[in-house]
Image (cartoon, rainbow, N blue to C red):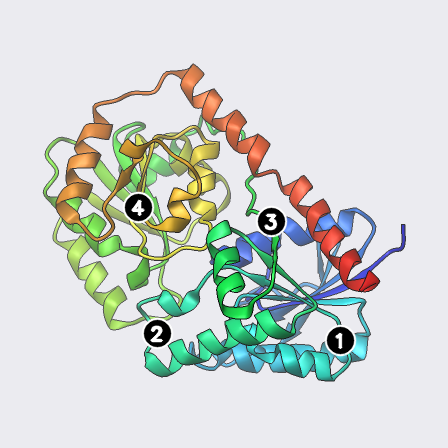
Amino acid sequence: MRRLKIFVTGTRGIPDIPGGVEKHCQELFPRIAAKGHKVLLCTRNSYVTKKIDEWRGVKLINCFAPRRKSFEAIVHTFIALLKARWHSPDVVHINAIGPSLLTPFARLMGLRVVVTNHGPDYDRQKWGNVAKFVLRLGEKMGGLYANEIIVISSVIANIIRQRCHRESNLIYNGVNLPKKSGNVDFLTEIGVEPNKYLLAVARFVPEKGLHDLIEAFKALKGNYKLVIAGEADHETEYSRNLRQMTSEDDRIILTGYITGESLNQAYSHARIFVLPSYHEGLPIVLLEALSYGLPVLVSDILANKEVGLPSERYFKCGNVSDLKEKMEALLEIKLSEREKEEIRSQIKEKYNWDRIAEQTIEVYRKVLMS
């Protein structure tokens, strides 16, 4: 089979840069490179702390991006597409609907474009009306002018069908089946005991619903702690208020952004995992929690419901009292090791990154044959 050259943009970069799109790209594109294809991925210089030219077979091209949430993605994508034209790839792969605004520009330059729609970002509470309009326009431009569209959930596929009157390629997010950690040194460092804490992994933005979780947890009785692993991309009034809320209860622990062994320990020894989001595409953190066999409790938004959890694992989105009651009920249940392994095997079967890489390459080939 012919070796392809793929140019990737729309992500802040890899490796180990916070964000769902970033985690998606970090898992997907090294696998595509390992199958013999040449992958060039454009990173944003304001997020890259260690300048490297290649990571796991993916060539990294560092580009300027202003560290302002309103302009960052669009300016970076414009520069990246100019670089893409110089590299003459077989396919340009644009991730997320904000960068997809420039899909017509890419096509005018003669580039073949695949867009991955990771979800309706205009539903995020952090955006004002102008930004939401631009994001909707980006979704439309990507939907109308990309050679092919990839969506990560059937919810997004329906949006593309309704707004752009075309079909898309449904390819789910993936997750690695981890080797759980037996170590507890990180837990000791942050002051928690195994199976004595609830875990949330999220950025400090309103749509992740951490304010609801904190409020519900404060009303929770018992000797459990709440560990929140995450950070703010940009310091905002919301993130400052979140820190103020957590400072009022010493049972709530903020770890900042963690990866590697620290995150492994946090997942491995949690009692339950909670995701109170108002908006998601298909949340990788939820798949990660399930890959550890964790009992999970998530908001009843459509993206979370697509995972197909039992009804008692959902609470009414934004309803703090329902969240509190469901947490109390779930803390009373302890899963057996057999039940945990069943959850892990189901996740491995449905959300396999190697199969996702193969499906993505097939979309590239479809573009080249059209």
Disc number placed over residue 293 in the picture, else none: none
Q: Which amino acid type corresponds to the residue marked 4 in the rendered image?
A: Asp
Q: How many badges with numbers are in the image? A: 4
Disc number placed over residue 171 in the picture, else none: 3
Q: Name the residue rendered at 75%, 75% in the picture.
A: 111
**Residue topped by disc 1:** 111
Q: Are marks 4 and 1 in contact (CB under 8 Å)?
A: no
Q: Which amino acid type corresponds to the residue marked 2 in the rendered image?
A: Trp
Residue 325's place in the image compared with 304, above or below, is above
Q: From the viewer's perspective, tell me whether residue 252 is left or right of residue 86.
A: left
Which of 70 and 245 lies nearest the eye of the viewer? 70
The earlier-in-sequence mark between 4 and 3 is 3
Give how far apart the Cα atoms at labels 4 and 1 are.
39 Å
Residue 183's place in the image compared with 116, above or below, is above
Circle 4 residues within 10 Å: few <14, some 14–19, many ≥20: many
Residue 179 image point, x, y percent: 54, 29
- As helix, strand or loop, the secondary structure at mark 3 comes to loop
Residue 141 image point, x, y percent: 57, 76
